[in-house]
Image (cartoon, rainbow, N blue to C red):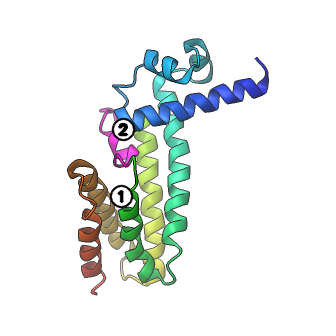
Amino acid sequence: MDSKSTSDAREKLLETTEDLIYRNGIQATGMDFLVKESGVSRKTIYKYFGTKDELVAEVLRRRDERWMNWFMTSVERAETPEARLLEIFSVLKGWFLAEGFRGCAFINTAGETGDPQDPVRLVAKEHKEKLLEFVRTICQEYGAPDPDALARRFLVLIDGAITVAHVLGDSSSADDALEVARTLLGK
């Protein structure tokens, strides 16, 4: 197999795995199903990734990079720090209304792993830490007296809105979170 075929097979495997896990979860996405859907042999899968957890962790790392880039770029379109803090919830609502929205891939997969040191859980933790840091930076720019505390509260609002939108199928959770955010900012 030449290097282009090898990279194509790896890419196809990663894309297929991400799609299946986001739609069905880790446990419901068995290796036989991955082989069938991706067209990549089990031997090739284990060549690239020693375990299913390593495959899922790589899928989540790639998703984290794409999702954070999209989210940060979208939020940063707002002109002031206050507007960016509030824009978070407009951006989320747009995501909630998008076809194929199934909640936060990181919350979903972390919920399937019991061990805090599981590679999948660690990637989910890293994602939430990056999200918290992004929000903390905006809170500092906003001039919050305690940007760390405000950022943690915003993270709770963000993840709460995502979870409610997913579990209840209610995109208005973004509107509710926005109202709480306004209260936190004294608006």
Q: Are marks 2 and 1 in contact (CB under 8 Å)?
A: no
Q: Which residues are magenta?
A: 101-118
Mark 1 crowdedness (10 Å alpha carbons): few <14, some 14-19, many ≥20? some
- Confirm whether the magenta stretch covers residue 77: no
Q: Amino acid at mark 2?
A: Thr
Residue beneath the point at 29% across and 32% down: 114
99 with respect to 54 (left or right): left
Badge number at residue 130: none
Question: In the rendered image of this protein, does residue 157 appear above or below residue 163?
Answer: below
Q: Which secondary structure, mark 2?
A: helix
Residue found 34% across the figure and 26% down from its top: 27
Residue 138 higher or lower than 21, as above or below: below
- Which sits earlier in the primary sequence, circle 2 or circle 1? 1
Give the residue at mark 1.
97
- Per the rendering, the mark at residue 109 is 2
Q: Is residue 119 visible?
A: no
| Residue 6 against residue 176 in the figure, above or below | above
Q: How far from the left and from the top, in percent, is residue 75? A: 48, 70
Q: CA distance from mark 2 to mark 1?
A: 21 Å
Q: Amino acid at mark 1?
A: Leu
